[in-house]
Image (cartoon, rainbow, N blue to C red):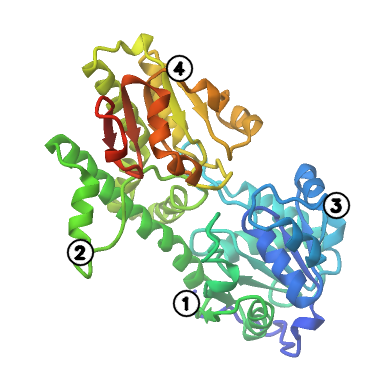
Amino acid sequence: MNAPFKAKNAVRDTAHAAASETIAVVGLGYVGLPVAVAIAERHGSAVGFDISEHRVDSLKAGSDYTREIDDARLAASGLSVSSDPAVLAGASVVIVTVPTPITEERRPDLSPLRAACETIGPHLTKGALVVFESTVYPGATEDYCGPLLEQHSGLKRGRDFVLGYSPERINPGDTVHKLETITKIIAAEDEAGLARMRSVYGAIVDVGLHEAPNIKVAEAAKVIENTQRDLNIALMNEIALIFDRMGIRTADVLAAAGTKWNFLPFTPGLVGGHCIGVDPFYLTAAAEKLDYHPEVILAGRRINDSMGSEIARKTVKLLIGRDVLPSTAKVGVLGLTFKADVPDIRNSKVPDIVAELAEFGIEPLVSDPYANSDEVQREYGIAMCEPGDLADLDALILAVDHADYLSANAALAKRLKPEGVLIDVKSALNARDLPESVLYWSL
């Protein structure tokens, strides 16, 4: 449907003001917690719900282990958190921020959304507005979530509750582009719902709102944001693979090309995390259901998903070139999180490097000051080592450019044998600071 959903008995009360709403946020991760805290601060109160008792207990103790909200702000916000779904009863606005991952077959995994709807349904109040922020394919909010909420609440969509969609744009670890400083897209299935979203989000987003004409447009806008970025990085990765075969350093080429005013500043690297490496599959899956088989988008995904293996194989080639047998090589890997200076390991591509090295008989030592070792072991089966173990190495792979590593640029080479190999995935180091005997390579 191209126009906003209408119904004769739709909820029409446009008199709802922000102060009159009772707001609950479902899911208190990287997306949900900043939203919940901002609402508690600016609306005076909010309740946050998460199925993880560990997460709730940590927040109650005053600590956000994602490092998105500092302890002082969390304590001052007055946010109430719970793992008991009963706290959702009576909420006039429910904001859903659960993850939307993909399966091992790289298909959309809507099970967290289903579980959220099943949890919310029995506690849904008549007149409620239910807003989804999770990344989905166009149509999912109305065609998938709406019926589930009706089924588990016994209420009628459009008459007893209204749907809204406002895609998240959180960038973990970014202190400049934050919830308050990023334009927020909002969409609802009727004008009254949109007015309520305008009131709720307008109070917490300083730079303003963009009102999409309908929910499908808002869903589509979100899913192509990361698809566009994914494709641009894939182009840089493919270019890097070509230039490496030509004996040209990609960073030097990009520095030269970047002097043109309209050259886009993308760089090669590992593409992981909860968005860029995942969202394109939501769009391509929806397209395939319409009998359109995407080529460009999936080609970009294949390139980006191959980069971990490419880096591992390059490391092995360089070791062999220095007469070091892979089976006897001591290799270290610095960094495992999906990006610099954050503890988030979701969809990290560093484990791909580790797995490919294992194919050559190499069991690398992996260290990361941000990653939780228990979580890494549970998620990837990788045992983290202590930083001090990374010494006398044949090769060192700087996989994630944490600031701590970059500040110790020259010291990294001291972890290597005199003629060791240093792999700089993000071209973050200054090769001139390294001993001449060290073989330096960057993507």
Q: Quadrant of residue 41?
A: bottom right
Counting other residues with Cα less than 10 Å from the Cα at mark 2, is it few (<14), some (14-19), or many (20 or more)?
few
**Residue 443 in sight in this render:** no
Q: Position of residue 129 (x, y in %)?
A: 72, 73
Judging by the rendered image, the residue that carries numbered circle 2 is 259
Spatial CA distance of label 4 from label 2 is: 42 Å
Element assignment for label 2: loop
Real-space Cα distance between discs 1 and 2? 43 Å
> Mark 1 packing: few (<14 Cα in 10 Å), some, or many (20+)?
few
Q: Residues within 10 Å of mark 3 (few under 14, many from 20)?
A: some
- Whether label 3 touches label 2, CB < 8 Å: no
In primary-sequence order, the first of circles 3 and 1 is 1
Mark 4 or 2, nearer chain start:
2
- Please state which of the two labelled residues, at mark 4 or mark 1, is closer to the viewer: 4
Mark 4 burial class by Cα count in 10 Å: few <14, some 14-19, many 20+: some
Q: What whole-number distance in Å separates the C-alpha atoms at marks 3 and 2?
A: 55 Å
Between disc 1 and disc 2, whose residue precedes?
A: 1
> Which residue is under mark 4?
363
